[in-house]
């Protein structure tokens, strides 16, 4: 995997958290994700990538952080039964902004990014490409952790 493709997604994620929500993030040590075991995340915003590189990028977080993002967005008067749907939509839009910001700084690289898809639920499954490793980059915030997972060829 090439850092000239991965780093713009990481930078865009950090910058979007900071600019949209005034949340500082601290990254931790990257690791290879074992796609056959369970995970801790409750919401994943997923992007498909094609072009000079192909693969998947996912921003993964807990509902607690997603609900905090809703609050920080000013969306505080939400009925409890609509809260998860609104959080999914927010994560989808957040992931879309991240992809637009990341692709805009990659000069000379031809990439097409799919519209974001959001998956929720404890231990939800992402069908990662089988022939390439998935690298997880964990982050911490004052409101909980999140992770950016990338898989490119």
Image (cartoon, helix red, strand yellow):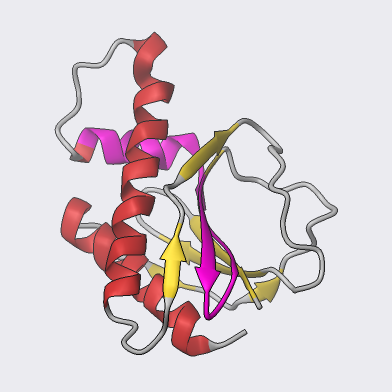
Q: Residue at x 51, y 87 (%)?
A: 3
Vertical placement of residue 121 versus 148, above or below: above
- Quarter holding the C terminus? bottom right
Provide the residue span drawn in magenta.
45-71
Query: Which image quarter: residue 136?
Result: bottom right
Front-lying residue, 85 or 101: 101
The residue at the far right in this view is: 36
Residue at left 43%, top 81%?
7
User: Magenta stretch: residue 95 in it?
Assistant: no
Q: Is residue 72 left or right of residue 4?
A: left
Estimate the x, y position of residue 83 in percent, counting from the top left.
37, 20
27 lies left or right of 25: right
* Quadrant in which the N terminus is drawn: bottom right
> x, y percentage for residue 151?
64, 69
User: Who is closer to the viewer here, 44 or 39?
Assistant: 44
- Relative height, residue 148 to residue 36 (above, below): below
Foreground: 121 or 56? Answer: 56
User: How many numbered discs, if any?
Assistant: 0
Q: Residue 27's spot in the image, x, y percent?
A: 46, 73
- Front-lying residue, 103 or 45: 103
Q: Is residue 59 magenta?
A: yes
The image quadrant of residue 134 is bottom right
Tell me which residue sits at (47%, 65%) in the image: 139
Q: Would you identify the image quadrant in which residue 22 lies?
A: bottom left
Tell me residue 126's x, y (percent): 69, 47
Residue 40 placement, left or right of 11: right
**Residue at the location (41% across, 84% down)?**
109
């Amino acid at each position: 995997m090439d850092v000239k493709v991965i780093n713009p997604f990481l930078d865009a994620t950090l910058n979007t958290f900071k600019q949209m929500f005034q949340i500082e993030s601290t990254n931790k040590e990257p690791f290879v994700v074992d796609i056959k075991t369970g995970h801790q995340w409750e919401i994943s915003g997923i992007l498909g990538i094609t072009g000079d590189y192909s693969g998947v990028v996912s921003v993964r977080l807990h509902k607690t952080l997603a609900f905090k993002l809703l609050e920080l967005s000013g969306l505080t008067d939400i009925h409890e039964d609509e809260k998860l749907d609104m959080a999914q939509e927010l994560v989808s839009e957040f992931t879309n902004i991240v992809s637009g910001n990341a692709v805009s700084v990659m000069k000379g690289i031809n990439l097409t990014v799919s519209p974001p898809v959001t998956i929720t639920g404890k231990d939800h499954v992402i069908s990662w490409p089988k022939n390439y490793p998935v690298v997880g980059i964990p982050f911490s915030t004052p409101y909980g952790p999140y992770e950016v997972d990338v898989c490119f060829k």
